[in-house]
Image: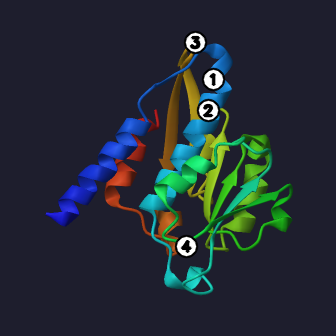
Amino acid sequence: MGRSFTALALALSWTWMFGPLRAQPAASEAKAHEARAHFVGNLIKSTDWPKEAFEDENAPFMLGILGKDSFSDRLDIVKVYGTKGRKLEVKHFSKVQQVESCHLLFISSSEENRLSDILPILGKSGVLTVAELSTPDLQKANDRNGMVYFTMEEAKPGILNPRFKINPEVVEKANLRMPSQLYAIAKKYWK
């Protein structure tokens, strides 16, 4: 019973999050910041890192942000989801060469045109990479070096639809585990 309940809870939390977000046009950016934070929080909650990814049981969970800060002041939302029982620490990077000691690296859409240069450098590090795209670009999302792609799509004025895609082979190659239900949800919401 515990396993099926967990799968149901996971599916419901992700499905709730990926329904349309209604916002007034002036509030769209604030809603987008909030949706990114919910996405990252859910992703951390749904992913298992190998024990060796942390120095010890008291080591913090390191969230890196490469490029423009896409969260504004909404990272408090990530804490609500939990960070595997660890303190959350956030590092900001302006260049990929600066990236170190992260468990999850959110690559802002400000770096979108450089993804083909960035992702191969990070692919060997075992860091869960989340690349934000300005639109659901299938060609960019099929880059075999990226793990997770995320975008916000405006369906109608004031209606934001979050979308994401996961490349399971790349995630597994980094010794990270995600539930199969998450892969199915990602397929449903990347259109």
Circle 2 residue? 32
Circle 4 residue? 174
Between circles 3 and 1, the one closer to the viewer is 1
User: In the image, what residue type sits under mark 3?
Assistant: Pro
Q: Quadrant of residue 97?
A: bottom right
Q: Residue 58 — which label?
A: none
Callouts 4 and 3 close, C-beta under 8 Å = no
Query: Percent from the top left, x then y, of residue 174?
Result: 55, 73
Between circles 4 and 2, the one closer to the viewer is 2
User: In the image, what residue type sits under mark 1?
Assistant: Ser
Circle 3 residue? 157
Callouts 3 and 2 close, C-beta under 8 Å = no
User: In the image, what residue type sits under mark 4?
Assistant: Ala
Between circles 1 and 4, the one closer to the viewer is 1
Q: Residues within 10 Å of mark 3 (few under 14, many from 20)?
A: few
| 124 versus 137 height, above or below | below
Asked whether residue 142 is in view, the answer is no
Of the numbered discs 3 and 1, the one sitting upstream in the chain is 1
Callouts 3 and 1 close, C-beta under 8 Å = no
Q: CA distance from mark 1 to mark 4?
A: 34 Å
Of the numbered discs 1 and 4, the one sitting upstream in the chain is 1
Q: CA distance from mark 2 to mark 1?
A: 6 Å
| 36 versus 85 height, above or below | above
Q: Nearer the viewer, residue 131 or 44?
A: 44
Callouts 2 and 1 close, C-beta under 8 Å = yes
Q: Kindly identify the residue that appears in the image at 49 percent across and 60 percent down.
A: 82
Circle 1 residue? 28
Q: Kindly identify the residue that appears in the image at 63 percent across and 73 percent down.
A: 60
Query: Percent from the top left, x then y, of residue 78?
Result: 56, 52
Q: Residues within 10 Å of mark 2 (few under 14, many from 20)?
A: many
User: What SS does tag 3 mark?
Assistant: loop
